[in-house]
Image (cartoon, rainbow, N blue to C red):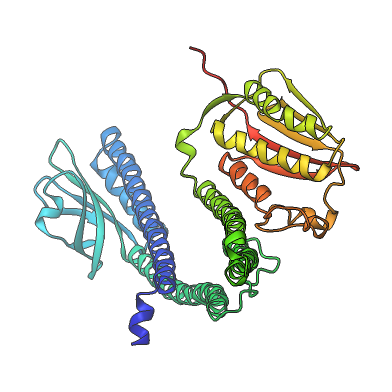
Amino acid sequence: MRMASFRHSVVFRMAAGYGLLLLLSVAVIASVFYVATAGLLRRDIDEQLRSTSRHLVQVKDQRNTDALVEEIHGLLTDNQDSDTEIYLLLAADGSKLIGNLTAWPADAVASDGLRQRDVQRLGRHSSSRLLVYRFADGAVLVVGRDMRDVRELEHMILVALGLGGVLALLLAGGGAALFRTQLQGQLKAIHRTTTEIAAGRLDRRVAVGDSRDEFAVVARDINDMLDEIERLMDTARNVSNAIAHDLRTPLGRVRAALEQALRSPQRHERLPQNAQYAIDEIDSLIMVLDKLLQIAEAESGVRRQSFEPLALRGLLEDIVELYQPAAESLAITLHGEVDGDPCVLADRHLLAGVLANLLDNAFKYAGRGANVAVRAARDGGRVRISVQDDGPGIPEPALAHATERFFRVDSSRHQRGNGLGLSLVAAVVALHRGQLVLSNTTPGLKVDINLPAATLSKP
C-alpha cells in the first residue's frame, strides 16, 4: 500500500522524470554521435572511390586499355590497402581482364553508380562498397572497398554506446535516488513542522539554515505565515480577554445599579435615575460593538468599491472647521495646513472618521491648552497626512502595541475610552493600502498616514 502511494507521490514523479530525461538526453546524444560517425566514414569512402575511379578513367581515356590494366596491376601490388581494396576491369564481352574479385552478382556491374553488394574477394566473402563505370566501348571498371573494418568499427561504437547507456542508466538511477532523498528530506521537515503546529505547538518553525534554494524560499514564506498566524492568534486571545473584561465590568455595574434600585426603599424615586444610567452604559457597550464591526468591515475590504479620487484640501478644511468649537472650549490651538492640492483614492466618510478619531485622541490626551496641527502634502507618489500634538505622547515600549484592539496605556486607563480608536484607524489605513506611523516628537505624538497619490479627474 505504501509503495502504491509512493508511486503517486510528487517525489516519485519528479525523480522518475529526472531519470527519464537524463536517459533520453544520453540516447539522443549517442544516436547523433553514431549517425554522424558512421555517415562520415561512408562519405570518406565514397569520396575515395570516386577519386580513384576518375584517375583510372583518365588513364584509359588518355592512353589505352593496356595502360589501364598496368595501372590497376600496380595498385593491386603496391601493398597499400591490400586488405580492403577492390579493383575489377571487364572487357566489352564481359570477360575479366584484371582484378581481385573472383565472383560477383550480375546486377553488381549492370549499371553505373555506387552500390552495396556481397561479392567474393580473393575467394573470400566480402560485403563491399562498389563504384561501377561503363566505358563507351562497353568495358566496365569496378572500384570498391571491403567494408568489414568499417562494420567492425561501427560495432565497436555501438558496444561503447551501449556500455555508456548502461552507465548512464546507473547514473540516472543514482541521481534520481539522490534527488528523491534531498526532495523528500525537505518535504519531511516541512511536514514535521506543520504536524507539530497542528498539535498545538505554534512556536515551531521550519528550519532554513543558510540555504538560498527554492525550498529555503518556501520555508521562509511558511515561517512568515506562521509568525502572522501566531500573532493573529495572540491578538485574538488578547481581544477575547479584553472584550470579556470590558463587557463584564459595565454589565456588572448595570446589574448592580438595577438591583440596588429594585431593593431600595425609595425604588420609585431611584429607578428612573438608575435606568438612565443603565441605558448610558448599554449605549457605551453598543458603541464598542459598533467599532469592532467597523474594524472587521475595514479589514474585509468590502468598502473599496466606494473609493473615488478625493481632494484632501476640502476634507481637512471641513474637519478643522468641525472641531474648531471643541478646540476653543478646551483652549486648544487647532491648526490646519495643506500643501498644494494632494489627492488620494479613498472613501471620504472613512477617511473623515480616521481624522476625527485622531483629533479626538489628540484633544483627550494632549489636554487643555495644547497645540494640535493637521497637515497634508504630496511626497512623490505618496500623500502624507499628519496629526501632531504637544501632549505627553505614548511611552516608547507601548508604540508598537498602540494599534492593537483594547490596548490602553496604564496612565490613560482612568479616562473614558475603549482602546479601539487607533485599531480602527489602522484598519482603515490598511484598507486604503496605506501606512500608519506613530512617533513621539518630545513633547507630543505625531501620527503619519502615507497613502498612494491619485489624480483628480476633471469634468
Q: Residue furthest top?
A: 459
- Point 49% across, 75% down: residue: 180
Q: Nearer the viewer, residue 267 or 378?
A: 267
Note whether residue 98 is visible: yes
Q: Looking at the image, is 318 positioned above or below residue 356?
A: above
Name the residue rendered at 27%, 48% in the picture: 69
The answer to whether 200 appears left or right of 370 in the picture is left
Q: Position of residue 400 (x, y in %)?
A: 75, 55
Residue 149 or residue 329, whichever sits in front: 329
The front one of 348 and 199 is: 348
The spot of residue 139 in percent (x, y) is 16, 43
Q: Tally the marks.
A: 0
Quarter of the image where the N terminus is located: bottom left
Q: Is residue 12 left or right of residue 240?
A: left
| Residue 368 horizontal side relative to residue 261, left or right | right
Image spot of residue 377 (x, y percent): 72, 25
The answer to whether residue 191 is above or below residue 113 is: below
**Residue lying furthest right in this view?**
442
